[in-house]
Amino acid sequence: MAYDHRKGFIEQPAAGGLVRETTLDFGSNHRGMNFGSYELLELVGTGGMGEVWRAEQRSPVQRVVAVKLIKAGMDTRELIARFESERQALAMMNHPAIARVFDAGSTDALRPYFAMEFVPGTPINVYRDERNLSVRERLKIFMRVCEGVQHAHQKAVIHRDLKPTNILITEVDGQPAPKIIDFGVARALSQRLTAATFLTHAGAIVGTPDYMSPEQASSSGEDIDTRTDLYSLGVILYELLTGALPQDLRKLPFDEMLRKLRDGDPPRPSVPLAGLSDAAMRAQQRGTEAGVLVHQLRGDLDAIVMKALDKDPAGRYESASLMADDIRHYLRSEPVLARPATLRYQARKYVRRHYAAFGVAALVAVLLTSFGITQAIQIRRVTRERDRADRVARFMTTIFRVSNPSQNRGTQITAREILDQASRDIESGLANDPELQAEMMSIMGDSYEGLGLYPQAESLLAASLKTRRRIFGPEHLATAASLHDLSAAVYQLGRYAEADRLEQEALEIRRRRLGAEHPDTLRSMNNVARCLVKQGHYGEAEKLHRQILETRRRVLGAEHPDTLVSLDSLGATLDDEGRYAEAEKLERETLAIKRRVLGSDHPETLRTLHHVADTAYAQGRYADAEKLHREELAALQRVLGPEHSETLNAMVALANALDDEGRYSEAEKLNRKAMNIQLRVLGPEHFNTLVTMNNEAEILVDEGHYKQAGALHRQVIMIRSRVLGPEHSHTLYSMSKLAWTLLMEGRLNEAEPLSRGTRDKQARVPGPDHPETAETQYNLACIAARRGRREDAIWNLQQAFDHVLKPRTILRISNDPNLKPLHRDRVFTPLVAHALERTSSPSHPR
């Protein structure tokens, strides 16, 4: 039998303003019907599953909505299950390109319904031709459709029936705004939407043939994934560009139609358009001429559409966002992923991106000489690009030559050694191309930062910034990117005021050039807030983090990776403010989202699990912290491996929790294991290695091994002084810990001058109000108390409390006179009080 392909298996225009696809008024007798808070006003569409009404909602708000009902006499179990899944799928969506669901329930007659956003729009295929939109305008609308589909896929939902009548166009402030409707045949990828999800008979096919993927035509849904929607998007884009469908399925028998869907090869969009009798009319609807339109489609757009229409799902785009990115590349005259990246193709794209400069050069050449000179100029520019590629190849060959066994005499070469070789050769190797030199310096600087080698990163990133300022000027986005990268390296070196100044400069450029809500602008704002935290401006930092979070939720969505970074950053700030319960609640909420969106073993999820453990540790719940860190460590060992830096950080954090539980032997064994791996893999000068060595010394103090602890502290101080500088905050922190070790050992004559010198330097860096400065002040209080200088001890203790503790810490009461001060939550023990009590005894030496 013949099948009417235009109607589809599930055909339903689902909101007001639609072109009616049927004249059958199945539900006209329900006009004026009331149920719940709704009154049905007008039937606007019917389909295989239900009826769609324009309705009025009276409470809790008064507004016009679209209400969808199961059609009378069509309430089979399968249809009800599909309707229920549609309701659940739509309820999961929160994107401007997807119609929102407001409510759901059933009528008095037990007919299921849901109320959704009323979209007074026009199907995209009608809107495009009524407005005579150009190809560029159509592509811009289509990219927003891709963004909506990507949002659905991130929610693990496939539409499975994307077509023009399910994409309505409204206008917001005079600009077209697409809305995707009818998720009635959506399928969850990894989530059970209802208890009766998709009761599809074996062999049943759901969708509309003209827009259906080959795998839909050959299965009952078991092999369907997000790439099915990518195929449908390819058909829609094909039709937007040409006004025709890829394959003519009209009047074909059902079996033949399915066979053609599975095996037929549609022509490239530019091919049939050139031979159509009404090509001129179609081109006019796109604001151009037939020949120009064919030329526009030939090449990049042909490749983009055909990649989406690949019969093999593996050959299509991996996501809707990648398809949108390729269209964006086309609009910017950049190479598209759908085409082979040949030198000729990339050179042509480069010329097109700089068409203004080439146009001026060509005009001057024509006026002065002839067309031949114009050709020579163009060839010279292409040659320059080729020469740049050759220079990069030669430079990379040179730096990687160090890894050749014949050059390195058989020794194993590390990424660090390759980077070191590159940093030595960068100035001479690319001296003739400063723009490329600056770019390579930026890449290598980021690589050094990833390895934790911050001084080397700073040197290269500072050189890149200097070159970009000279070449591009102070307002260029490349200059802002260098400022941002250099700020990150300086931040890791503990120079927070300088990092703040650099990031503020980057932020101002990005605000002026990109706007206040661009993702890059928000990233700069986030780094400014981090610098504020490190400088002790917690209230100001919290306010800024909340502003960034609100903007990212609105612009990027509640579950975008940048939004989740903001949640983590706000939680860390609350933690630093001492608001541990709030911080833990927020971090646990973030953890739940990441587990659902990214999975429990994703590195970002495990990073948040680490933060949750930190908040438990800060509140003195060491057993809870231990349990969470063990869970984190087991997952990281499984996902990243036993020697990854994140794995080792988790191991060190677990050792800290064991140490504070008083399980010193276990803590020392675990921490030493991590330290030995870091010494071998990262080297003794790496930031993380030095932190672990410092922790090892503190555990040795807790065990009473003062001489071993002192020797290890001195080793850390020597390395940090050489790598970071003798007055760096991390170096001074190690000096303060050495003074504490000497104090516990009873060597007061050495501990006191070391503490005083360290305190005076800390008053300058990191500052008098910093917790580490207060800890050193506390050392002086303990020393004075043990020497019997009661007033001096009380004064030093009061200084520590006045600068740090008043707004954020309590005094812990304990009978253990040797309990150390906790670095994490800045709690000061009664060791001073104990020592002062001893000074009141007549037998105590003064």
Image: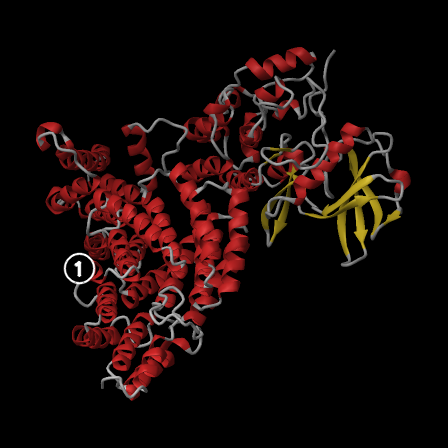
- Residue 18: x and y, percent? 72, 39
Residue 776 to residue 502: above or below = below
The residue that disc 1 covers is 711
State the image quarter where residue 350 is shown: top left
The answer to whether any part of residue 48 appears in the image is: no
- Residue 649: x and y, percent? 34, 49
Front residue of 295/485: it is 485
Number of dots carrying numbers: 1
Residue at x 31% of width, y 82% of height:
838
Q: Secondary structure at mark 1?
A: helix
Front residue of 61/87: it is 87
Q: Quadrant of the N terminus?
A: top right
Q: Which residue reaches farthest front?
A: 843
Q: Quadrant of the C terminus?
A: bottom left
The answer to whether any part of residue 151 appears in the image is: yes
Q: Is residue 247 left or right of residue 494?
A: right
Badge 1 crowding class, 10 Å Cα cut-off, few under 14, some 14 to 19, many 20 or more, is few
Residue 396 to residue 683: above or below = above
Q: Which residue reaches farthest right?
A: 29
